[in-house]
Amino acid sequence: MTSATLTRKPEKVANQFQEIFDRQKAYFDSDATKTYEWRIDQLTRLENLLNENRESLQEAMSSDFKTASQEKVFEVDAPLGTAAFAKADLKEWMKPIDVVVPKALAASGHTAKVYREPYGVTLVIGPFNGPLTLLFDPAVNVIGREYGSPQAAVRLHLLHGQHTGRQSDHACRRGESDAAHS
């Protein structure tokens, strides 16, 4: 193997991932992922994947981790329960929520709503040799409601340094300003 081969390989891999990202971004931009039907379909597919591969997944958990039978059952059943919960509450999570506006705007008849929609393409990374819940639970949240819940929005703002400190953590989680509590 020549040094030229070594230098081209990471570039080729990066291009491969860029192509995947570009296709996913184009699909996201089509707004297909914003619909209730699409999210339910994806959660159902995840449930089917787990149910159809239950025995194989449990056998792999047993051989990789020498886990107790209850633990290997939990590793499949917990994500199934998370997906079922997400499906049951999805319509509620997707509803716009009213938020407080400054008094001057409210006095002039203005209102505000937060439309809880996905922000973009999300990569879920999980351990190849770890508990299944570390991979499937985040995937369920991304499909069902990530960036759609007030908690996720606060988490996103804190990660991006956009939290101004003007709202208490409790108020942020509820999507309200401190002024609304005084």
Image (tube, grey):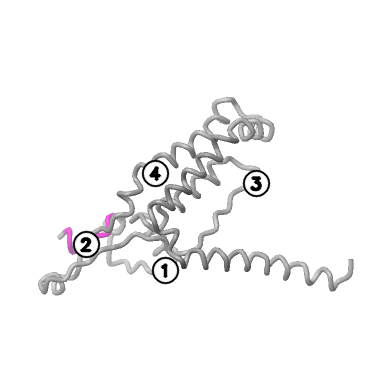
* Nearer the camera: disc 2 or disc 4: 4
Q: Secondary structure at mark 4?
A: helix
Q: Check disc 4: other Cα within 10 Å, few if <14, some if 14-19, many if 20+.
A: many
Give the magenta range: 174-181
Residue beneath disc 4: 87
Q: Are marks 4 and 3 in contact (CB under 8 Å)?
A: no
> Which image quadrant for residue 4?
bottom right
Total marks drawn? 4
Q: Are marks 2 and 4 in contact (CB under 8 Å)?
A: no
* Nearer the camera: disc 3 or disc 1: 3
Q: Residue at x 54, y 45 (%)?
A: 134
Which of the image's four quarters has the C terminus? bottom left
Q: Are marks 2 and 1 in contact (CB under 8 Å)?
A: no
Q: Secondary structure at mark 2?
A: helix
* Nearer the camera: disc 2 or disc 3: 3
Residue beneath disc 1: 161
Above or below, 147 against 104 in this view is above
Marks 2 and 4, the one that precedes in the sequence? 4
Q: Amino acid at mark 3?
A: Phe
Q: Check disc 3: other Cα within 10 Å, few if <14, some if 14-19, many if 20+.
A: few
Numbered badge on residue 178: 2
Q: Nearer the viewer, residue 3 or 49?
A: 49
Q: Amino acid at mark 4?
A: Lys
- Where residue 159 sits in the image (x, y, percent)? 44, 63
Marks 4 and 1, the one that precedes in the sequence? 4
Q: Amino acid at mark 1?
A: Gly
* Nearer the camera: disc 4 or disc 1: 4
Q: Residue at x 44, y 40 (%)?
A: 82
Does the magenta-highlighted stretch encompass residue 175? yes
Marks 4 and 3, the one that precedes in the sequence? 4
